Structures are given as C-alpha cells and as structure tokens.
Image: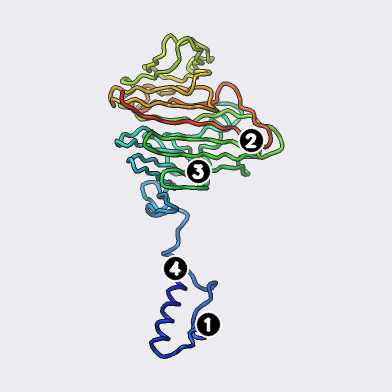
Amino acid sequence: AVNAILVLFLVFYTSSHGNTNVGSTIRTRLPSISRVRVPMSMQRSPQCTRSTRVRDAIYGTHEDKPDGLENIKLTHPSGAEATIYKFGAAATSYKDPQGVEWLAVRPDAKFDGTKAISGGIPHCFPQFGPGALPQHGFARDSYWEVISAGDSTATFQLTESEKTLEIWPYPFKALYTVTVDEDGLKTKLVIQNTGDKPFEFTGALHSYFDISNIDDISIVGPFKGKEILDRMQDPAAKIVSESDAITISTETDQVVEGVVGSVKINDKGKGKSLLVSSTQGWADTVLWNPYGNEGMGYKKFVCVEAAAAMKPVSVEPGASWVADMDLIPSAL
C-alpha cells in the first residue's frame, strides 16, 4: 500500500513538471520493498490492546487490557454472539438472539493464564476427573491456535508440545470448532492420533450454564432407571435415578453413564429452557454443583457436561474421534 501511494505521487509529480522519464524517476527515488518498514503503531501486537476485526472475526483481550488474555468474538445477524478465549479454547459467553446469557463464569475465575478459566466451556482432555494425569488434563490450561475464523465461526487447534509430552506421551491434534447462529451455539471436537501408537483418553466439555437460581431449575433427560455414579459418596457408589427430572439441593458430583444427547435445563426464573444436544462422540452426562459454596457462586450456575467419562476412548494411529455438542435455547 505504501509503494502504491509513492508510485501515484511520482507519476503525478513528473507529469506536472514535464518529465516523461517516469521509470528512471521511480528507480532512483522509490525505496525497495524490503526497506519499507511498517510503523510500530500500525503493527498488530501478539496481545491486542483493543477489539480489532481480523478476517471478519473480532479479536480482543480480557477487559480490553493490553496484557489480557486474547479472545475472539463471534456474531450472527440474528443478534446471537459468543466469546471464546485462545487460552483453553474456552467459550465464556453465549447470548441467544434475545440477549439472554447461557454461559456462566465463576466469581473466583482467573483470567491471567495461571490456571484454567473456571467457567464457560473448559476442555477436559486427555483425562476427565482425578487420575494419573493432572486434574482434568492439560487442554483447559493450554494456549490453542486460531486456524480459521469468520463472523460466526472459528476453529481452534492444539497439538502436542514438550509440556504435553511430559504429561501424556502421545502426538495428537485437537480441532475445536465453535459456531453461533440463530438456533444456538454449536461445537465440534476432533481428536486425531498423529503418532504411530494407539492411545486412550477420557474427556468432557465442562460446561458451566448460567441460571437464575439453583433452586429454580431442573435437569430433564432420560434418567429414570439409569445408574448414576455418585462421586460425593466415599468411596464413590452407584445409585439408580427414580425420575427423569433431577433437582439439586446439596453438593452434587454425578456421572450418568450412557445418557447424553437430549438433556434440558429448565429454568423457571428465566422462563426458558436450554437443550444440551449431542449426536456423536460424547457418551455420558456429568452433573456438578458446589451447593452452598458462596465463593464459587453456586446459586448462579450448574454444570451439565457432555462427557466420555466412564469408558476410555481408543484412537488408532492415523484415526480420529469426533464429538459434537449443541446448545439450543427455547421458551419453557
């Protein structure tokens, strides 16, 4: 752009002064491309200091701070919008076309990169819950790369690094696509085995959902008669659900094995319902709420997680595992 402006200026200058040897003027006066420097004020720093539109997506930082964690905002003509952070590829906000917020962030959440963001939709990979690896794995506190982005969709990528190989010795590629439209928020997670040995993992989308009050919601799905692993018991024990509707009135940490895909959060306070839908990949539903913990803001969120928690997923070399989760709001 700088060179084009200089060329136009020189053409005008030489023609107005009777000099027809434009070529020689350009050769003697025009700096080479390699020597043209873009001023620092025009360069985009790794951390944007304000919201910036790049490739039709809006990039910004947490609270617009120069050193804040980078995020990307997706928008749809319907008015729906979502915000996703590169740190953990964590979506922290989804507003439907009516402006109703459906994702919650805990009041004790950190946005400084020192720990995973406690809220939104963090990734549990390659381990769900406690075990041989760090709690919930490493994907939720790793920086993901944005490999494509548009107004209403973005794809994030995470691959192995020295850090991950020390924890879990397998090459992999994770691709996570988030799309917002008039119907809801759609997610797709692809885990590719890029190594030469098979690997196993467990995982979940540790989704925190915004609610009016924990005492005013019910979680509805095909739960009746299903076995539930109650992890609040010591040791964890299986119980049988007596109803399709589950309410929370005490600290809750449960895994409903084999139930996923059509689970609703009915919120009397909002007068709306949110369908947590999955058609492939995820196999279980996890319910979590730290009932009574004011510091975590227990009244204002519930975790209803699409998960592969009870049985490890096995992926052969060169193969991929695919899972989707959609959030679809509606009137109650």
Q: Kindly identify the amino acid type of the residue bearing the numbered disc 2.
A: Trp
For residue 34, side relative to residue 216 (left or right): right
Q: Kindly identify the amino acid type of the residue bearing the numbered disc 1.
A: Arg
For the residues marked 3 and 4, what is the alpha-carbon distance in whole angstroms? 31 Å
Q: Between label 3 and label 4, give the one nearer the viewer.
A: 3
List the residue tagged with mark 1: 27
Examine the image and state in which quarter residue 49 appears: bottom left
Q: Few, some or many C-alpha atoms within 10 Å of disc 4 (few <14, some 14-19, many ≥20)? A: few
For the residues marked 2 and 4, what is the alpha-carbon distance in whole angstroms? 43 Å
Of labels 3 and 2, earlier in sequence is 3
Q: Which mark identifies residue 155? A: 3
**Image quadrant where one finds the C terminus:** top left
Q: Between label 2 and label 1, give the one nearer the viewer.
A: 1
Q: Which mark identifies residue 168? A: 2
Q: Kindly identify the amino acid type of the residue bearing the numbered disc 4.
A: Pro
List the residue tagged with mark 4: 39
Q: Between label 2 and label 4, give the one nearer the viewer.
A: 4
Element type at mark 4: loop
